[in-house]
Image: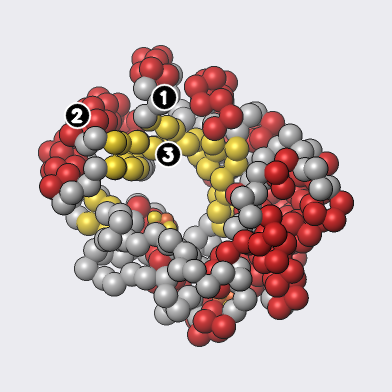
Amino acid sequence: MSFDVARRTIDETVSAGCKKLRLLLMGGEPFMDFDLLRRVVEYARDHVENVHIKTVSNGTLIHGEVQQWLYENRDSVFVSVSLDGDRENHNRNRCGSYDKIDFPFFIRTYGKEAEASMVASTENLDSLCHNVQHVEGLGFNVKCVLADDDNWDAERDCPRLAEQLDRLIQYYLTHPERKPFTMLRESLGNVNTQMNIGHCRPFVNMHCVAPDGQRYACHRCTPYYNNGAWQILETDTVSSDGGIMESCASCVARNVCCVCPALVHSLRNNKPMAATMCRLFRVVHRANAAFVAQLFLSHPEHPYIKSMQHPAEMIDGARSILTHLAL
Ligand code: SF4
Ligand code: SF4
């Protein structure tokens, strides 16, 4: 991206009245051009009252002066590291880069907030529990999603996913010092609420701009993600209303499932894939409900319970999922 495209985007955002900007810089690899990244960050900070910048990086170029700059700017610039697990699992999909990442730097800089972005795929699914434990052992919180546009097969992969989540539940129950990874931190308190949940709204509260200035629904819908399979231009209407299938409208998990408009838009017209993802999502929702139930029944002092804002609603949501959501 040229500096001009970045500057123009920030200017347009400011002239539209934005006073609080969350800027997400994605690649490729954002640190391929550190000077540009630094200029964009400085420009944003000079022109918006309240700005916070996040990047997702493979970490391989974060050394020397880049580290120093990030450390000095840690209050306003945050880096999430793409990390799929131990050396062998990570290197399989990420060009052998494990040993090029300075893990202690991220822990030193972001402390308890240090975050690793992990992708669970058909290939590494059987190592999910091991990989999460490994990355948490390095000191990171783990943010994990199922790979988009992978060759998922519900019959084959649902039992694999269920087994891994079950192992992770036992692990978190017996390791209260660990913050559960995101896949086991669903907001089940929203399951029975009638309130309108504040979902992401592409083109309303967020905009995505590619290096050539072309606008897309979000970073996940650019040609750089999913081999371009999810390309969604800003001119398309994107909303999570209705879910990925007709049955979503009456599903008990509706408020915690398919809340990503890009995912809904991309799967709605692909019935076989939507049905497969629905089966995987059900496994995840039921695992979350089982986790909450076990926490309250046998680990009432667990720090995860203490961190819940509305524990009664969480129990209620877990009960509804376990009662009404079949696998
Ligand atoms: S679990 Fe399936 S039916 Fe229910 S909301 Fe999710 S995708 Fe739709
Ligand atoms: S549309 Fe989905 S992937 Fe894109 S920013 Fe919103 S929630 Fe994230």
Name the foreground residue: 138 vs 226: 138
Q: Amino acid at mark 1?
A: Arg
Callout 2 touching callout 3 (CB < 8 Å): no
The vertical placement of 235 against 94, above or below, is below
Is the C terminus in the top left, top right, bottom left or bottom right quadrant? bottom right
- The label number, if any, that marks residue 74 in the structure image: 1
Q: Amino acid at mark 3?
A: Val
Q: Which mark is residue 46?
A: 2
Return the x and y of residue 46 as percentages of the image width and height.
19, 29
Task: Report which residue position mark 3 lands on.
Answer: 56
**In the rendered structure, are the residues bearing label 1 and label 2 in contact, judged by CB atoms less than 8 Å apart?**
no
Quadrant containing the N terminus in the rendered view? top left
Please identify the quarter of the rendering in which residue 268 is found. bottom left
* Callout in the foreground (2, 3): 2
Which residue does the image show at 72% across and 62% down from the upper left? 315
For label 3, the SS is strand
Whole-angstrom CA distance, mark 1 to mark 2, is: 17 Å
Give the mark nearest the N terminus, 1 or 2: 2
